[in-house]
Image (cartoon, grey):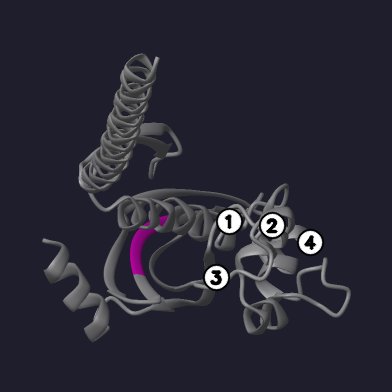
Amino acid sequence: MNIFGKKSAAADIKARRSGEANFLSDAIKQIQMNKMVALLQFFTIAGLIFLLVTVSGQQKLITIIGQDGETVTLRSQNLTSDVLRRQVLFYSRQVIEKYFDLDFRSAIENRNSLRDIMSASLVAANFGRENHIVENRIVKEAVDNRYTSRYEWLMLPWISSMDYPYITVFGQFRRSVSREGFRPFEDLKNVKLVFQHLRDRPDPFGRAHDLLLISIDEIDSENIDFRNAINRRR
């Protein structure tokens, strides 16, 4: 009995050691598996980050409003810069066409519609205290005398300089103003616009763009800035 007892105790010890070995082996395998899963997750996340960075640096196809008011698709590496330039050209044409409109049927409405893009100083210079009636002698004269007008673009607006956040634009057109009983009057307009790009918008949902028109000037054909702008354009 003692012999059998000793053999049984030895067998128990051997079995216990075998179980402990199996437990340790399973634990080690589980740890190694957890490490492999963690490593795989790390490389997956790193790969996604690399993919996002790579895609963000590549050229993209975007669709925006072009200078003629049509939607256009372009490929851009610097999305913000291209969109900004096209917005400036689009709004420049709108501003010039509306600001110099002397048709009695649309002059006041067109001038009033520019309030949203003008700086406070421009609004004060072009609008009355009621902030909806244009205080401009020429516009009032056009309405009172029922002028009609048309224009022909000689040089569509182009960006002369981008001294961020200020953007200078020039344009040239010929305007013809008619009044019943009088010969039409034609004049050449050289226009200089200066926009400011708003970096920090107080209300990001209150405006369709980030542009603020801070000056609009009619200049002489021999103006040095205008001549230099034409030379750079060519």
Please give the residue where the numbered disc 1 appears in the rendered image.
Answer: 98
Task: Name the secondary structure under disc 2.
Answer: loop
Q: Amino acid at mark 3?
A: Leu
Whether 99 is drawn above or below 106: the answer is: below
Task: Name the secondary structure under disc 4.
Answer: helix
Please give the residue where the numbered disc 2 appears in the rendered image.
Answer: 113
Spatial distance from mark 4 to mark 2, Cα to Cα?
A: 20 Å
> Is there any visible trace of residue 184 in the rendered image?
no
Please give the residue where the numbered disc 4 appears in the rendered image.
Answer: 144
Q: Tell me which numbered mark, 1 or 3, is placed earlier along the sequence.
A: 1
> Is there any visible trace of residue 141 in the rendered image?
yes
Answer left or right for 43 relative to 65: left
Picture coordinates of residue 122 (x, y %)? 63, 79
| Mark 3 vs mark 2: in front | 3
Spatial distance from mark 1 to mark 2, Cα to Cα?
A: 8 Å
Task: Name the secondary structure under disc 1.
Answer: helix
The residue sitting at 53% across, 59% down in the picture is 95
The segment highlighted magenta reads: 169-174
Q: Tell me which numbered mark, 3 or 4, is placed earlier along the sequence.
A: 4
Picture coordinates of residue 132 (x, y %)? 82, 66
Asked whether the residues under the numbered discs 1 and 2 touch, taking CB atoms below 8 Å apart as contact, a structural biologist would say yes
Crowd tier of the residue under label 2, counting other residues whose Cα lies within 10 Å: few below 14, some 14–19, many 20 or above:
some
Picture coordinates of residue 181 (x, y %)? 65, 51
| Mark 4 vs mark 1: in front | 1
Q: Amino acid at mark 1?
A: Lys
Task: Name the secondary structure under disc 3.
Answer: strand
Asked whether the residues under the numbered discs 4 and 1 touch, taking CB atoms below 8 Å apart as contact, a structural biologist would say no
Which residue is nearer to you in this view: 226 or 10? 10
